[in-house]
Amino acid sequence: MLENVVSALILAGIEKGKAVSEAEDILKQVELSDQKKRKAAKLSSGQKQRLSIARALAKPAPILIADEPTGNLDGENSEKIIRMLAAAAKERLVIMITHDYDEVEELVSRHITVRDGVIDSDAVMRPAEGNVSHGSPEKKIFKNLSWYITGLQAASRPVWSAIMLLFFMLTAVSLFVFLGTFTVNLDDSSTRYYDDSVFADGSKDRIVVAKSDLSEMTSEELERLLEVPYVSSAERYGFLSDIQYHYRENIDYQLHYIAETDQNGNPTGFVRRELTLEDSDLFLETIPCLPQGSSFLTAGRLPENMYEVVAAGDESLIGTTFPVYIRDRKNWQVDAYILFDATVVGVTDMAGPLYFDRQLGRVLIEEYAGNQNIIAPDYTLSDNTRLKFSASMYNSVFNSIVQQIRQLTGGLDYVKAEERLHETEFHFPVYGDPDAEIVLKPDVGMHASTLANYILTAPEVFEKIVADDIYGNVLSLTISDYAYTDRVLEAVQSLGYHAVSPYRLGTTRQDETLAAERLQTLKICILAALAVFLLQVLALRAMFGMEIGEYKLLANLGLRRRTAIWSVVWQMLVFTGCGQLLASAVISCACYMGVERVHNIVKYLPVPYIVMFMLVHLAAGLLASLWVQAAVDRQVYPLNLQNSDLEMDDEEA
């Protein structure tokens, strides 16, 4: 109840602190000070009349008009009301309209009778008491009055305010879901087939990076790229990511044992082993480079050479050994592979399944650097002066020497050819010293790899021939999710590098069925978003229309049109902001609880998109507020829109 009177004083321009003090004094005058904390709706009819008088008294106007103030009141309450009006008449002009003149006869100073709209009599009954002021009292204007009205409207109807907040939250969530789904489906790569003619590994979370001049990547550049947001790891030997490996028997590769027979079909006692390499989805990864603060191993140690690996799993894997077949389908001859036995020395909780030592990258980089040879260290060799060639390499060299002998002697002497082979010298440059070289002779030993240019040498020789600080001119970055592809590409390119997504580059052929489904999804999302937008505008217009009565009451207490209009805008902004905050909390909870659709939308949306969605939601609210403002103008302040039809005579003017 106190707030009713305070509002009247504030609307009259009184500073809030002073308004509260004056309101308490006025309630004492109308004998309602003991009821000041009660709501007006819970008062009796007599108390409500006195509250109306209190509000009228609170307004410092020079004239107070009371139309039938004692109607429907008992004699006791009628007398109280009349005495209060008589007391008010000492400070202002009080005009009271009544059909029962007898109850005010002793108090009035002037009696005017009106019959059929015409003054019938006008008599002065007694001299007026007190000083009637015709000026406005000195007052301190209350600042941010429209903001005060906004809070008053919300606090006076808590249920309505709660419904408004819930409505704004639901519309914000709906627009987020529909517009977010629309944004996600703008990327049509999911409707296309992947073509591995450029990159064998078309993983969605892979980004390939190179310098503009295609020069070698340095460790400093690698560290800089790891600082890019959403980059979870980097493969410094980026070309490895397109080389497959096979290690799971009956999954990645098949071994078949076939009994050999003679020309008559009789078993010879020999068994031939045939290997079939399946099309593996596993691509080489060395120990990854991680951002600062990230951990890799969960148990064990890092590998120290290419024959040791880290596996994804638990500690029980440590110590296991298995054959690994490495194959480059794009650059090696058909069915060519490198084979070695790998031992698990550490385990990790990363995806894996296997992580190789970086020495493997150094082994394979020789061919990709244009040296034609793949040189690998063999820790079983003891003679540093000899190489062990693959069978195909040995036969190639041997047949070449036999051809030379045949040309010289006119015959074929395999003994001399083998002796000649052992005397052959191979010259390798020493890395970092262009004037030095290593001269090696081949060993007659064989190994299971089938590459013609695969050479095994002692580790000491390998370290001199193959540099340990060359990584190649391509890096392969792994991002935490495909949704961040555009942001990572943009960030990497802003650093001056060339960057591509192999998955996007390889998705060239489109699946017509998936493309049609995507188009249908886009249409549904945009229509649903428009429907939510229009529903928000219409619903808000209807819900804010309930406030027209409140604005009429406040207008009677002195609320100006400009203040009323701004209070509508403020209410819309407050409800929109609070609704968006609640929607953000709901969306965050959905992500935390693992709602996949919501989580995918959040990942796809950068900050500018989220801001855009918030502005769309706000635009619907502001559009509705324009409609509400027009209704307030039309129903609460009609005289502001049209001229009065009452003309003043010369004396009134």
Image (tube, rainbow, N blue to C red):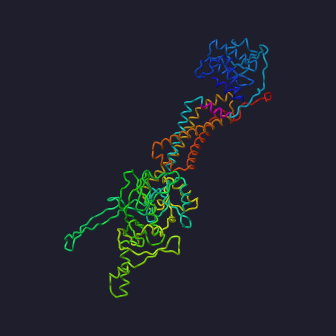
Horizontally, is 493 left or right of 245 in the view? right
Q: Residue at x 37, y 65 (%)?
A: 339
Nearer to the camera, 7 or 250:
250
**Which quadrant is home to the C terminus?**
top right
Residue shown at the point (75%, 28%) measured from the top left? 139
Report the side of 498 relative to 423 (left or right): right
> Can you give x and y, in whole percent of width and height, for residue 4 in the image?
64, 25
The reply to whether the magenta stretch includes residue 18 is no
User: Chief secondary structure of the magenta span?
Assistant: helix
The quarter of the displayed image where residue 639 is located: top right
Residue 630 visible here: no
Nearest the camera: 165 or 285? 285
Residue 387 falls in image quadrant: bottom left
Closer-to-camera residue (343/571): 343
Placement of 518 over or under 388, stated as above or below? above
On the image, the x and y values in percent for residue 212 come to 56, 65
Find the magenta span and give its range.
145-154
Q: Is residue 165 above or below residue 521?
A: above
Q: Position of residue 131 (x, y in %)?
A: 79, 19
Q: Residue furthest front?
A: 382
Q: Which quarter of the figure is the N terminus placed in? A: top right
Quarter residue 211 falls in: bottom right
- Residue 318 shows up from this direction: yes
416, above or below 77, in the image:
below
Q: Position of residue 441 (x, y in %)?
A: 41, 75
User: What number of labels is visible?
Assistant: 0
124 left or right of 80 in image: right
Q: Nearer the viewer, residue 349 or 173?
A: 349
